[in-house]
Image (spheres, grey):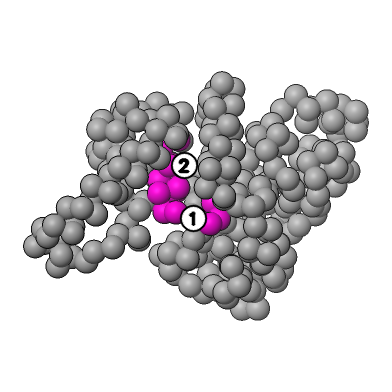
């Protein structure tokens, strides 16, 4: 397994956001994490990526290394990159500069060499820019490389956030509601881009998403959370018909046939 989470819990005062959660992610798979609002999905991402620290007893192992309690930058350096539900881009900086920030943990020279402006620094910067331009081409933003990121549309900003995470050269890419606010056309574009990136770079991907179309059409396995606990896990086709999942999303007011129709239309 690339990622193994065992007994993971997180409390905020008297609120239990995640409760003794176990999760295993195989290398190369696309895993969907779904659940109603407040089910603990983003908290789980924050725990894995080091934004939050887990309660004692929880354990996170990535690529065979116990990373429990590591700070975010150390986790990122080991190959876990993520996007956030709320876009966090530097609007006054260019699109290309936003990607370069994502690559920062892998820069091969120090501050002293940069200050001196040695030939090796110039060579490295040229190589790095070429690599980032290739990535921009892959996500369809080449023509926007030099413009301020704040001038991008919401769909383009989502792609930029995805590209900046990819600039970190991750083994595991975690996407927190990457399709939020997008039109159906842009949802399809984002989905195809994620699948292409996975194929091109050999990624393992974990997606939190409320747009069930994204999850059902892209994920190998879906994990369902409710009140911080895992209530179901399996192939997308099986998850759609799981009574616990139906009740978690919509309560008991609708009949199963109505719920299945709703899920298929989502």
Mark 1: few/some/many CA within 10 Å (<14, 14-19, 20+): many
Horizontal arrangement in the rendering, residue 213 relative to residue 102 (left or right): right
Residue 16 occupies quadrant: bottom right
Residue drawn at point x = 32 percent, y = 56 percent: 104
Q: Earlier in the sequence, mark 2 or mark 1?
A: 2
Question: Which mark lies nearer to you, 2 or 1?
Answer: 1
Q: Which mark is residue 170?
A: 1
Residue drawn at point x = 73 percent, y = 36 percent: 216
Q: Identify the residue position indicated by label 2 in the image.
A: 162
Specify whether residue 208 is in view.
Answer: yes
Residue 111 is a magenta residue? no
Horizontal arrangement in the rendering, residue 50 relative to residue 233 (left or right): left
Is the residue 184 above or below the residue 173 in the image? above
Question: Helix, strand, or loop for circle 1?
Answer: loop
Question: Percent position (x, y) of residue 77?
Answer: 43, 64
Residue 237 occupies quadrant: top right
Question: Percent position (x, y) of residue 153?
Answer: 40, 26
Residue drawn at point x = 53 percent, y = 57 percent: 171
Q: Quadrant of the C terminus?
A: top right
Per the model, the C-alpha gap separating discs 2 and 1 is: 11 Å
Q: Which residues are magenta?
A: 159-174
Question: Helix, strand, or loop for circle 2?
Answer: helix
Specify whether residue 177 is in view.
Answer: no
Do the residues under discs 2 and 1 have CB atoms within 8 angstroms?
no
Q: Nearer the viewer, residue 228 or 46?
A: 46
């Amino acid at each position: 397994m690339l990622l193994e989470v065992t007994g993971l819990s997180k409390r905020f005062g008297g609120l239990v956001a995640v409760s003794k959660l176990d999760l295993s992610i195989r290398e190369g798979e696309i895993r969907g994490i779904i659940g109603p609002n407040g089910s603990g999905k983003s908290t789980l991402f924050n725990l894995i990526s080091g934004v939050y620290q887990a309660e004692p007893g929880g354990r996170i192992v990535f690529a065979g290394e116990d990373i429990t309690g590591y700070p975010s930058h150390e986790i990122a350096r080991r190959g876990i990159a993520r996007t956030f539900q709320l876009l966090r881009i530097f609007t006054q900086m260019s699109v290309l500069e936003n990607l370069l920030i994502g690559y920062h943990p892998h820069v091969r020279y120090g501050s002293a060499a940069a200050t001196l402006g040695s030939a090796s620094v110039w060579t490295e910067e040229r190589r790095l820019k070429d690599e980032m331009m290739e990535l921009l081409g892959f996500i369809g933003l080449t023509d926007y490389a030099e413009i301020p990121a704040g001038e991008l549309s919401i769909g383009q900003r989502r792609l930029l956030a995805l590209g900046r995470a990819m600039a970190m050269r991750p083994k595991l890419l975690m996407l927190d509601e990457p399709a939020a606010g997008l039109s159906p056309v842009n949802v399809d574009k984002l989905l195809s881009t994620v699948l292409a990136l996975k194929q091109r770079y050999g990624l393992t991907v974990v997606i939190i998403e409320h747009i069930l179309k994204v999850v059902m059409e892209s994920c190998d396995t879906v994990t369902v959370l409710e009140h911080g606990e895992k209530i179901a896990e399996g192939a997308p086709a099986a998850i759609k018909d799981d009574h616990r999942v139906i009740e978690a999303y919509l309560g008991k007011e609708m009949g199963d046939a109505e719920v299945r129709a709703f899920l298929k239309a989502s």
